[in-house]
Amino acid sequence: MRRDHDKPVYVGQPWRVVLRDLDVDVRAVLRRAGQPSNLFDGAGSWISVDDFYDLFDATEAEAGGPEVAVRAGGVVSAELFDAAYFAAICSPDLTTALTRLGEHMQLVGPFLLDVEVTAAETVARYRCKHRPDVARGLGLSQLAFMVALARRATRHEIVPRRVTVVGPVDELGNCAEFFGCDVVGGEAYEVAFSAFDARRPFLTRNDEMWETFQPGLRRRAVEAGEFRSTRAEVEEALFVLLPSGRSAMSDVASELGIGARTLQRRLAAEGTSWLDVLNGTRERLARHYFASTELNATEIGFLLGFADPNSLFRAFHRWTGTTPESWRSEVRAADARS
């Protein structure tokens, strides 16, 4: 299934299921949003970001308030979140789950989940690549989804440290009751969890399931774009394989459904090699982790598939000429000056 370049959001049968579970009239929502009655039928449809926002606004209007968005996000459903949902639920803890979701969203679709990890808390911020705003229903549902995910996976009634939404909060009805904390106004849709809660072990951790659903994540990345080079497909495969320690060429070839020699030939035809792609992907991810998160070198080395921290230190020195912590300090100092 290929999408129209100008229609980056996929909607399908799961939407119909969730709306019915929430007792919201599907046809009324589609009619109010100006969409055809068969939008969710069959293989589903690709729609624009603007149309996607209209769907959330129409859902809220038909339901009579924003509480429906929180209820929708609280329906942690395999039918709705498919491979990305399973990648999260089978993680060892919430920080890892949110990081995996954020990494996947960077590759697929028009939305981003920025995850910031500090000694005190893990903060997840939801935003759109193509628009400066986020539809209220969409933002609320995503915040509720993350809280519901944490509660279901830990079997603990986790309460966020804070929940931030854009715009006035006096119109949100009883949304705060679901979160268990005050909902405050701000510049982004953001939820913060204490470091203790973010590191609570997921009772749903399943490393085998993580490996099972990695191909589904990769296929979604391929389906979400136009023609992709072999290099791009290898990078995407590495993106989900590296944290599981599967960084050999044979692992990637198997993930792509081809032989190792075929993979080598295709990369050579594009003027690159397996090692070039592996090192380039690791460098790009390493720079991202050290610049954008508080993860330590051991944790980052694990996410990059290095057998021991010293391997990461040596590789990072080759890429930047300095140590990871020195590079992190320099980058953050430069950001602070700008």
Image (spheres, rainbow, N blue to C red):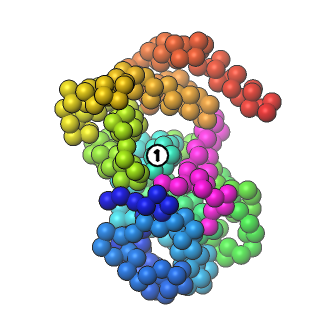
For residue 258, side relative to residue 95 (left or right): left
Q: Which residue is mark 1?
A: 107
Residue depicted at 26% across the width and 26% down the height: 264
Estimate how packed mark 1 is, as few (under 14), some (14 to 19) or many (20 or more) residues with alpha carbons within 10 Å. some
Report the magenta residues as a range. Answer: 109-135
The percent position of residue 110, horizontal first and vertical second, equals 53, 55
User: Residue at the location (36% across, 39% down)?
Assistant: 229
Q: Would residue 121 be found to the left or right of residue 42 on screen? A: right
Q: Depth check: 7 or 323 in front?
A: 7
Note whether 334 is above or below 1 in the view shown.
above
Residue 97 visible in image:
no
Quadrant in the rendering for residue 16: bottom left
Identify which residue is drawn at 56% across, 49% down.
Answer: 113
Work out whether residue 44 or residue 97 is closer to the camera in this orientation and state it. 44
Query: Which quadrant, please, contains the N terminus?
Result: bottom left
Nearer to us in this view, 280 or 175: 280
Residue 290 inside the magenta-drawn segment? no
Is residue 135 in view from this perspective?
A: yes
